[in-house]
Amino acid sequence: MKQRFTSFLCIGLLCTFLLSLVSCGSNQDHPQSQTQSLRPSDAAVSIHVNQVAFDIDGAKNAVVVTDDDQQLSSVSLVDQNGETIANLDAVASQSFTEWGKGKKHYTVDFSSVQQSGTFKLQATLANGSKTTSPAFNVAKNALFNLTMTDVFKYFVINRNTSERDKAIPIIDTGELINVYGGWNDAGGETGKYLSHLSYSNYFTPQQGSFIAWSIMSAYENAGEQFKQLGLTDKVLEEAFWGTDYLHRILSKDGYFYATVFDRWGMDQNRYITGYKGLEGEYTPNYQAAFREGGAIAIAALARGYRLKKETGFASEFTAEQYLADAETAFAHLKVNNLKYCDDGKENIIDDYTALIAAIELYKSTQKDEYFAYARQRASSLLGRMGDEGYFIADGKVRPYYHAVEAGMPVVALLQYREVETDDVARKNVEAVVEKALRYQLALDKKVANPFNYPRQNFQTFDFEKQTYTSGVLEGFFVPHNNETGYWWQGESARLASLASAATLAKELFAKSDQADLVEFAGELEVFAQSSMDWILGKNPYDLCMLYGFGVKNPAYSESGGAMVKGGISNGITGKMEDPEGRGIDWMAAEDYGNWRWVEQWTPHGSWYLYASSVMVK
């Protein structure tokens, strides 16, 4: 189903984007400023590799692609002077037809090379022709160390500092609320969301509150590394910028305001409101349910309490205020969550987000009520594991698939395992996590998949008829016919979320005394690295989605808005015209639709930050 913006919406978007460019800086300040009508490489031989960095003792893989009528002779790792460091094996993939017809694909593993430096890969065909990959760095914690300074600059640039937001009306009431602060959601707009797409029920992503939570989690995971980079104060400033905003958007009744929105700049006015659909139709559903960012707001505030106590860092509100907010909101949502769910029913997203909220409250208070609630939510989440090995989202047959946070159920369960004291309960968590991730790896291998892209189960949906139109399907990318009616885009956040889940599980299983689990941990490390590699350039378009890094970044598009160094673009999708998201596409629309690929969106940065922090060794 091919979606179109109305011309009215396009004009509004363009105005917003131009304003955004003034405030954030034009893409001309950065490496790329070109039109990109790209397709996967048609060269006789090409090398696709992470264009930024690998950890010295981590997984390292690349993909070499040749024409069907060409014979690959050799692949080698070379240093900056062109000297050969190692000759490498290239393993031919089975025939890959999803988007690689007429090509041979080879995977190249150079994990055994554990030498610091800057390197390239070189591939030679039997006819003597050669090609060389982009350069990449290899060092201890190289990716984290090379990129974190600019990732945090991106968040700072994306702060919303408009004085106007100190008095924004609630839709249909006229009551003015101070919702100053937080972050603009994306390069192309100034809306602020705890979660958008709430009307779709199964696609709600964690947005504004997740930024704060991920920053604090990253600090806990990699505080020493941040210190070495001189980033400690910057990390704490952003964390408390976020928690201060969450305090302001907590209503006197105990719920969070979900959205500050002006129809992507189309409206002169700006409201605290709910909205739905491509036209941004205002609704009175502005109370954030657990799954609509409310739970992660609670988690961030509870975590902010501990961080402020630990560091004494100055911010507008006190640690005690953060904790009081978290407890007030939790008590309110325990009773009222169903009222705020747009379909009046909870689903898997309520489970894993409320589980994280309860865990954070328990860590901050040691109150038994929060531990008991965490057990309750964990039990519900564990019970959603289907026989096949994937989670069921709705208690019926709909598989859990998510274009933003597919790894979050596993992340939540492993967070819960850290506080659970009962051995049987911990083993149950480990069993479900193992089952989910073994299924993911098996799903990825069911078809030719040389890039090791995380595939997914899904159903297609008729938005107008509100019915599913397929059984459970399998594919690479999120389906375009889904419950939102229009929303699909690149999946950089999804990839980083799965890398996070796999890395946390790897750390668990690597400690096992069972050989099969230790082997499984190694497979998870490769999976996690491959997911990050796709974001960083190991993809058919050789695009590094992390702007300002690598040799080729997404080009500026008016509908995507400002391009900022350290920001991450949405990414590659399935074919635009395909309702199931089959095939592959990049910037395939007229410009007003190219936000689907190029727009820098905060959840990508948040999940990249979190994944990078758990991958620190």
Image (cartoon, rainbow, N blue to C red):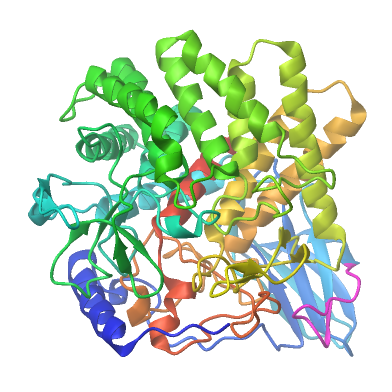
Q: Nearer the viewer, residue 550 or 495?
A: 495
In the picture, measured across the screen, residue 381 lies left or right of residue 319, that is: right
* Residue 94 within the segment the image draws in magenta: yes
Q: Which residues are magenta?
A: 92-104
Q: Nearer the viewer, residue 285 or 498?
A: 285
Residue drawn at (28%, 67%), measured in percent from left and top? 189
Q: Quadrant of the N terminus?
A: bottom right
Which image quarter: residue 379? top right
Q: How many marks?
A: 0
In the picture, measured across the screen, residue 190 lies left or right of residue 137, that is: left
Which image quarter: residue 308? top left
Q: Secondary structure of the magenta portion, mostly? A: loop
* Residue 180 within the segment the image draws in magenta: no
Residue drawn at (85%, 31%), measured in percent from left and top? 517
Q: Position of residue 539 (x, y in %)?
A: 65, 70
Q: Position of residue 252 (x, y in %)?
A: 20, 32
Is residue 195 at least partly visible in the picture?
Answer: yes
Q: Position of residue 318 (x, y in %)?
A: 20, 21
Please tell me whether residue 594 is drawn above or below residue 383 in the rendered image. Answer: below
Is residue 84 at least partly visible in the picture?
Answer: no
Please tell me whether residue 282 is drawn above or below residue 38 in the rendered image. Answer: above
In the picture, measured across the screen, residue 428 lies left or right of residue 539, that is: right
Please tell me whether residue 274 is drawn above or below residue 300 in the rendered image. Answer: below
Q: Nearer the viewer, residue 605 or 60?
A: 605
Residue drawn at (65%, 48%), measured in percent from left and top? 393
Q: Quadrant of the C terminus?
A: top right
Q: Position of residue 447 (x, y in %)?
A: 86, 66
Q: Nearer the viewer, residue 233 or 504?
A: 504
In the picture, measured across the screen, residue 354 lies left or right of residue 602, that is: right
